[in-house]
Image: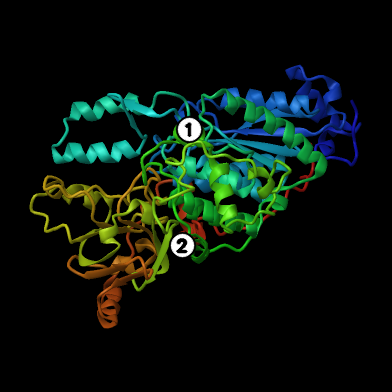
């Protein structure tokens, strides 16, 4: 089989008769690759984030083999390669610190190697945006295959959600309403199969965003990791990427401004993670598509949350798949006039064509009829003198009675200050107080850790309090919940107004009107700013120094300033 409708990128390595081509081909033959594989057929890179330290991605070696089958069936040649894998549960100080580094690994690996198209295998939270960001900067034909969610957690005959149950049960243990032994019993019950969190955490949100953007095949978001149909989807992806190379369909041909508007509305409808705003803004920046936090508010504000899934609702991802999956949500939005039906997808069909036959098998899980979970979902972007560049809250996971609230601040200067004082019986705090956590943003932590959903003071938990307004420059897990205001920008470490807040200051939150105000006079704030000194950022590694020097604020997606943009995949000069 020899095909060369036009000279492929990989032929710059394999297609000649000179010394360099001999080097490129010859050493590849030591793997048992037949020489005719280098005759011009599409060479497909399989970018794999498999790692035993990343349990959510621990099954991706198997999916890679399925992708390879599909590539071979379609007449391509597959080569698998590893990139940095970010396991949310294990990496310290936070996986977000390394998202941009992993994206650099992906971008440079794609550009430096002889591939014509790439399949991205991802799953755990930051593995999806890091791979998509890196691939976007290269802009080759690209398909994403997500690893899929775990099966539903089961504890004492009841379903429990990974992550969400951790936050719920750990607070119950601190309140003294359950024993530590009961908390420990939930460990294995939550994680009983390969896959990522089966709540609508960041992993499931980003798998949904991949499908909504058109980068994944139908049912990429919800098919369980252990379901045979996840393997089938992977094999189909292997076939399709070969066709995309032949048709020269690049990522930028698929993912456009319309795609991002669709994804924002899908995120609102599913009650997706607040982390999606950071990741999609960063991806858009790599593709040179204008996208802002204000766009998130504008396009998601009036979209009802119709997916009844934890942490906002009741069910889990396995139930979502059996009910019909993301195509049901997208069809409902399309029929409501909220999606661009002509947006492209990697399947070769438009969004409208792809979801036209979707059928809802459980209207309590996907509420396409009757009452939605919340009338106005999405991610609300608040502005005011406390966060001039914005802060975000997820209304579907918050307490309605706290969505308009004024109260005195209880300030923690950093995460260590919080941990040392939160359970002090002498802490001056009431249910009306607003907890404020500083120096946990991109530069301050560093890496913008998921510590914004601060656990409540033990003495209030023991009184039955289960939610309070919390404000920080940090992030929170997509599996978490509560009236938690995040991503305050500029962050404290960059001299943002949150750095000036003092215990006792009145703060007014008005989610309906998108306001976040510190009730302190401008004169007093000016005086405090004169006294403010930047903290020692404790840069202990070369990469952390690079990170702090180049990371953008949350409203810009926390990407590096030096990485924004599409640099393409021109063939580099020879190495020998």
Please determine whether, in this image, residue 308 is positioned above or below residue 511: above
The quadrant holding residue 435 is bottom left
The quadrant holding residue 28 is top right
Label 1 environment density (alpha carbons within 10 Å; few <14, some 14–19, many ≥20)? many
Across and down, in percent, residue 76 comes to 78, 29
Label 2 sits on a secondary structure element that is loop
Label 1 sits on a secondary structure element that is loop
Q: Is residue 522 left or right of residue 432?
A: right
Residue located at (39% from left, 34% from top) = 90
Q: Nearer the viewer, residue 244 or 547?
A: 244
Residue located at (21% from left, 27% from top) = 182
Q: Which residue, given by chain and number where applicable, does mark 2 sit on?
A: 301
Is the N terminus in the top left, top right, bottom left or bottom right quadrant? top right
Residue located at (45% from left, 44% from top) = 202
Q: Nearer the viewer, residue 109 or 310?
A: 310
Q: Is residue 58 left or right of residue 308?
A: right
For residue 405, say whether it is visible: yes
Q: Which residue, given by chain and number where applicable, does mark 1 sit on?
A: 149
Q: Nearer the viewer, mark 2 or mark 1?
A: 2
Please determine whether, in this image, residue 549 is positioned above or below residue 123: below
How was this image coloured?
rainbow
Label 2 environment density (alpha carbons within 10 Å; few <14, some 14–19, many ≥20)? many
Q: Nearer the viewer, residue 40 or 56?
A: 56
């Amino acid at each position: 089989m020899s095909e060369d409708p036009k000279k492929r990128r990989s032929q710059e390595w394999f297609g000649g008769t000179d010394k360099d081509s001999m080097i490129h081909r010859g050493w590849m033959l030591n793997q048992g690759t037949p020489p005719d594989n280098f005759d011009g057929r599409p060479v497909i890179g399989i970018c794999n984030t498999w790692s035993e330290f990343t349990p959510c991605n621990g099954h991706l070696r198997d999916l890679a083999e399925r992708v390879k089958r599909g590539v071979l069936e379609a007449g391509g040649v597959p080569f698998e390669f590893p990139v940095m894998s970010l396991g949310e549960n294990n990496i310290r100080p936070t996986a977000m610190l390394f998202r941009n580094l992993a994206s650099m690994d992906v971008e440079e690996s794609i550009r430096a190697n002889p591939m014509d198209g790439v399949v991205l295998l991802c799953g755990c939270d930051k593995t999806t945006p890091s791979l998509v960001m890196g691939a976007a900067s290269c802009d080759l034909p690209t398909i994403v295959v997500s690893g899929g969610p775990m099966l539903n957690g089961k504890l004492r005959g009841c379903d429990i959600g990974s992550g969400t149950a951790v936050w719920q049960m750990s607070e119950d243990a601190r309140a003294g309403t359950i024993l530590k032994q009961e908390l420990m019993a939930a460990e294995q019950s939550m994680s009983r199969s390969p896959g990522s969190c089966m709540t609508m955490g960041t992993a499931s949100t980003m798998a949904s965003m991949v499908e909504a953007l058109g980068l994944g095949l139908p049912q990429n978001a919800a098919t369980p990791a252990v379901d045979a149909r996840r393997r089938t989807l992977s094999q189909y992806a292997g076939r399709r990427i070969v066709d995309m190379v032949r048709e020269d369909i690049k990522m930028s041909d698929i993912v456009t401004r319309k795609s991002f508007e669709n994804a924002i509305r899908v995120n609102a409808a599913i009650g997706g993670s607040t982390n999606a705003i950071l990741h999609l803004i960063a991806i858009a920046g790599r593709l040179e598509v204008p996208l802002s936090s204000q766009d998130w508010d504008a396009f998601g504000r009036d979209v009802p949350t119709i997916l009844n899934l934890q942490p906002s609702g009741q069910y889990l991802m396995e139930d979502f798949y059996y009910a019909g999956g993301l195509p049901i949500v997208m069809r409902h939005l399309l029929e409501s006039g909220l999606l661009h039906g002509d947006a492209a997808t990697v399947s070769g069909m438009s969004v409208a064509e792809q979801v036209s036959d979707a059928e809802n098998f459980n209207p309590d899980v996907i509420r396409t009829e009757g009452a939605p979970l919340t009338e106005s979902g999405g991610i609300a972007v608040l502005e005011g003198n406390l966060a001039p560049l914005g802060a975000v809250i997820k209304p579907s996971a918050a307490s309605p009675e706290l969505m308009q609230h004024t109260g005195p601040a209880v300030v923690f200067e950093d995460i260590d200050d919080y941990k040392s004082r939160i359970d002090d019986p002498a802490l001056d705090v009431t249910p009306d107080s607003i907890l404020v956590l500083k120096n946990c943003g991109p530069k301050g932590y560093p890496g913008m850790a998921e510590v914004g959903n601060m656990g409540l003071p033990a003495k209030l938990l023991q009184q039955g309090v289960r939610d309070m307004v919390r404000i920080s420059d940090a992030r929170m897990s997509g599996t978490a919940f509560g009236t938690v205001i995040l991503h305050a920008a500029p962050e404290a470490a960059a001299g943002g107004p949150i750095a000036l807040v003092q215990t006792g200051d009145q703060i007014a939150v008005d989610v309906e009107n998108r306001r976040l105000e510190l009730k302190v006079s401008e004169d007093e704030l000016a005086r405090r700013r004169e006294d403010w000194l930047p903290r020692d950022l404790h840069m202990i590694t070369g990469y952390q120094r690079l990170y702090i020097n180049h990371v953008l604020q949350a409203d810009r997606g926390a990407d590096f300033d030096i990485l924004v943009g599409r640099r393409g995949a021109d063939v580099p000069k020879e190495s020998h």
